[in-house]
Image: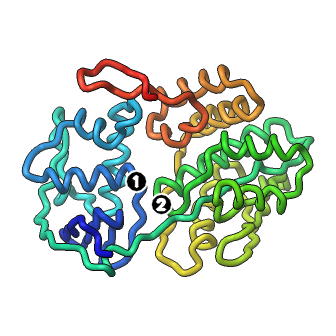
Amino acid sequence: MPSASPVHRFGRCQLDVGARELRVDGMFTALAPRPFALLAHLVHERHRVVPKTELMDEVWPDRIVTEGALARAVWLVRRAIGDSDERLLQTRHGVGYRFVGEVHTEAATPQDAAPRRAPLVAWLPMEHEAAAPGQVDSALGLVALVGHALAVEGAAWPLPLSTLMGVLQRLGPGAEASAVAAALRAEHEVDVVIRTRVAREPGGYRLDGALIGGAEAASFTVRAPDPLGLGRKLVRLLPRLLHPEGGHGAPAWAHDDPWAMELLAHALHARATGHAALAEKFCRVLLDHAPELADAVAGLRPAEPARAPDGARLSRP
């Protein structure tokens, strides 16, 4: 059936709110759910300046975020629609944002309303050399950051760490990757399982990986002088493997700050080993330092209380 929501056309872009789809020059352009919701709200409210507080309530109704998270979402929107000079989306400093581009609105057609679904991906804990001190933390942080980058772009949705760890703990140590993949597909409708092994070698690191499931089996190898370098290469490579039909460009790297990666690695390691309170402490420090990584650590923390209309905090059932 056709989508009941309109299609907005502006500049080189077509925004179908009902299908949750953005196209630029006729090509599908990945945009994660929260930046997409931000763009849709700004286009709908283009007759006025939308305050920052309203945008944070609209885009993140289930959690409390800082203006840093909003600024990151605005940056992602501008990059997706090619608005580096703010001809379409303007910043009104100290107040909020306003969409000022000329918009033509029409009813969606059945072809316009065809949805695109990013695959649900489960990334198994990296295998590693036991003799490499600190490598487990680096590997866990690397997995989270790469998964975050893919989710931001809509190229893939990572299975929450808590869900994955629950399956692994139930199956027990030593479970074959094929058995884990079968359980994840049956219980959580996971599309693709990623298995990787990281090792030190002269001059840096080597990562060997394989995709289990998806359109076709694929294996890959990347090398880099440090874990961040591995992450950048994986972020460029994985969309091509997950979407062999095309339509997804390489996402931007999730974060270039080694300290943020280190904090995230320790938070993940604490959570994976059952130290929830310690994981929460690492998460708080990380989010103070890099609030744009809120979605990357969402599965590590207790649910945030929602914001009440008067600004008070309340708990959701």
Q: Horizontally, is 85 left or right of 76 in the view?
A: left
Q: Hey, what amino acid is under mark 2?
A: Gly
Residue extending furthest toward the left: 47
- Distance from label 2 to label 1 (Cα)? 8 Å
Comes first in the chain, label 2 or label 1: 1
Q: Nearer the viewer, residue 219 or 206?
A: 219
Q: Which residue is mark 1?
A: 33
Colour logic: rainbow
Q: Is residue 26 above or below residue 44?
A: below
Q: Nearer the viewer, residue 226 or 145?
A: 145
Q: Hey, what amino acid is under mark 1?
A: Pro
- Residues packed near mark 2 inside 10 Å, few (<14), some (14 to 19) or many (20 plus): many
Q: Nearer the viewer, residue 4 or 297?
A: 4
Question: How far across and down, in percent of the image, does residue 292 sit?
Answer: 44, 40
Q: Residue at coordinates 36% horizontally, 20% vertically from top-left?
A: 313
Contact check, label 2 and label 1, Cβ < 8 Å: yes
Question: How far across and down, in percent of the image, does residue 2 sit?
Answer: 29, 75
Question: How far across and down, in percent of the image, does residue 62 sit?
Answer: 40, 35
- Residues packed near mark 1 inside 10 Å, few (<14), some (14 to 19) or many (20 plus): some
Q: Is residue 162 above or below residue 187?
A: above
Q: Which residue is mark 2?
A: 154
Q: Residue at coordinates 31% horizontally, 77% vertically from top-left?
A: 112
Q: Residue at coordinates 92% horizontally, 49% vertically from top-left?
A: 174
Where, quadrant-wise, is the N terminus in this rendering?
Answer: bottom left
Secondary element at tag 2: loop
Secondary element at tag 1: helix
Identify the disc placed on residue 56.
Answer: none
Q: Horizontally, is 159 left or right of 102 in the view?
A: right
Q: Residue 50 appears in which quarter of the rendering? A: top left
Q: Residue 166 appears in which quarter of the rendering? A: top right
Q: Horizontally, is 168 left or right of 98 in the view?
A: right
Question: How far across and down, in percent of the image, does residue 99 sit?
Answer: 16, 54
